[in-house]
Amino acid sequence: MKYQQVYEPRHPLAHPKAGTLFVHRRNLYDHIGEGIHQCNWCGALLTWDGVAYPKLCVDHLYNDTTDNDPDHLVASCHSCNVRRAPHWKGKLSTTDRRVARHFLSQGKACAWIANLLGVSRSTIQKIKSNRSYQRDLIS
Ligand SMILES: [Zn+2]
């Protein structure tokens, strides 16, 4: 799926020559503003221009690249964004497993977490029944 673009030459994120930018980047920028932000998944510090800190990627929470509602977009570092890409369907990276355990410990439903990470519910249920998850709860 192609990302939607807009022509807004005066936007801070617009391409200096073409004057265009991606809708998802514009929407999240307008929502959270300039400055240093944290990766939603690992907490790494990020900036929009990638100068002082690594470049902020805009992650589609529900893996739908046409859904540019700012509430469905989060800041992400490059490696977390790549790990969450839809080609991971069915498999969970270490980071995703950590994310899943985090939300399980907060009492979120397996279906909700599965939707967030783009995997089947049984994948999350497996983590839930796993001992390492229960160990995380104690520590
Ligand atoms: Zn990250």
Image (cartoon, rainbow, N blue to C red):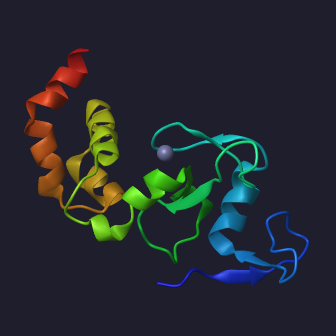
Q: Nearer the viewer, residue 105 or 82?
A: 82
Q: Is residue 139 left or right of residue 81?
A: left
Quadrant of the image occupied by residue 62: bottom left
Q: Position of residue 121 (x, y in %)?
A: 17, 57
Position of residue 96 relative to residue 59, above or below, is above
In this figure, what is the number of numbered marks? 0
Q: Residue at x 53, y 84 (%)?
A: 2
Quadrant of the image occupied by residue 61: bottom left
Question: Which residue ends up furthest to the right in the rendered image?
Answer: 10
Q: Dividing the image into 4 quarters, which one contains the C terminus?
A: top left
Q: Residue at x 30, y 62 (%)?
A: 118
Q: Position of residue 135 (x, y in %)?
A: 17, 21
Position of residue 117 relative to residue 69, above or below, is above
Q: Position of residue 3 (x, y in %)?
A: 57, 80
Q: Residue at x 14, y 39 (%)?
A: 128
Q: Residue at x 9, y 29 (%)?
A: 131
Q: Position of residue 63 (x, y in %)?
A: 41, 67
